Amino acid sequence: SYVLTQPPSVSVAPGQTARITCGGNNIGSEGVHWYQQKPGQAPVLVVYDDSDRPSGIPERFSGSNSGNTATLTISWVEAGDEADYYCQLWDSSGDHPVVFGGGTTLTVL
Amino acid sequence: EVQLVESGGGLVQPGGSLRLSCAASGFTVSGDYMTWVRQAPGKGLEWVSVIYSDGSGGRTYYADSVKGRFTISRDNSKNTLYLQMNDVRTEDTAVYYCARARYSVTGFDYWGQGTLVTVSS
């Protein structure tokens, strides 16, 4: 089944840009979704289909996807962005269609 | 307004059974992709099971870790998603979330608040 690989942690200072990667075999040919999860809360979809934002998600959150890496970019990072972030895609090739990455903890210094 | 409310979690002994429910409002569960995702204490999200929309054949899929023990289903008349958990193990201890996707391209845009399942003797 498909495997998505994320770095365990990313640290960034307030006001800087955070980039969280999600690696997978030819992931650029798939639609990737990103979720933010704060402690004790359910995940929230922040980017879908590589680069689209749901209603209510700030423009500071953006995404890209090419080759073997998808990237969630958070511009002008704020303390409130500190959370775990997960990538996810649908793998139609087998019997495990929903795949999540292992998650990345974003720390705002 | 779209809302998902899980219930049915609790303490269960190893080898026991439990049924989780996810009551939906603001949309119809039969028309969308519904999934269960769990999160063990201190761990990441783990996909458990998914049921496709009626329009996509209503197919069901399971993670290897629960296949043969868990069953996903829905009651269209109650607009509710279920997860029947049999022969539970200590490693099934987690918060269980239900979530919905309109289509696979949109991701899971609504999630429930989660229900805690603790498997312990």
Image: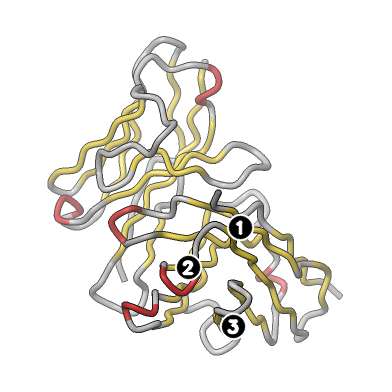
Marked residue chain, label 3: B
Q: Earlier in the sequence, mark 3 or mark 2?
A: 2
Marked residue chain, label 2: B
Q: Is residue B63 above or below residue A109?
A: below
Report, in whole angstroms, how far the alpha carbon at label 1 lies from the one at label 3.
20 Å
Instruction: Give the percent coordinates (x, y) of residue B57.
Output: 34, 83
Nearer to me, B27 or A19: B27
Q: Is disc 3 on the same chain as disc 1?
A: yes
Q: Is residue A82 above or below residue B64?
A: above
Numbered label attached to residue A96: none
Nearer to me, B55 or B63: B55
**A106 displayed left or right of A66:** right
Q: Residue at x 55, y 49 (%)?
A: B1
Mark 2, Cα crowd under 10 Å, few <14 / some 14-19 / many 20+, is: many
Instruction: Give the percent coordinates (x, y) of residue B115.
Output: 71, 60
Q: Which residue position holds label 2?
A: B34
Report, in whole angstroms, how far the alpha carbon at label 1 lies from the one at label 2.
11 Å
Q: Residue at x 18, y 49 (%)?
A: A68
Q: Which residue position holds label 1?
A: B4
Q: Tell me which corner region of the image, top left, top right, bottom left or bottom right, holds residue A73.
A: top left
Badge 2 amino acid: Met
Between tags 1 and 3, which lies in front? 1
Badge 3 amino acid: Phe
Nearer to me, B81 or A106: B81
Between tags 3 and 2, which lies in front? 2
Q: Earlier in the sequence, mark 1 or mark 3?
A: 1
Tag 1 and tag 3, C-beta contact below 8 Å: no
Q: Which residue position holds label 3?
A: B70
Q: At numbered mark 1, what does the secondary structure look like: helix, strand or loop? A: strand
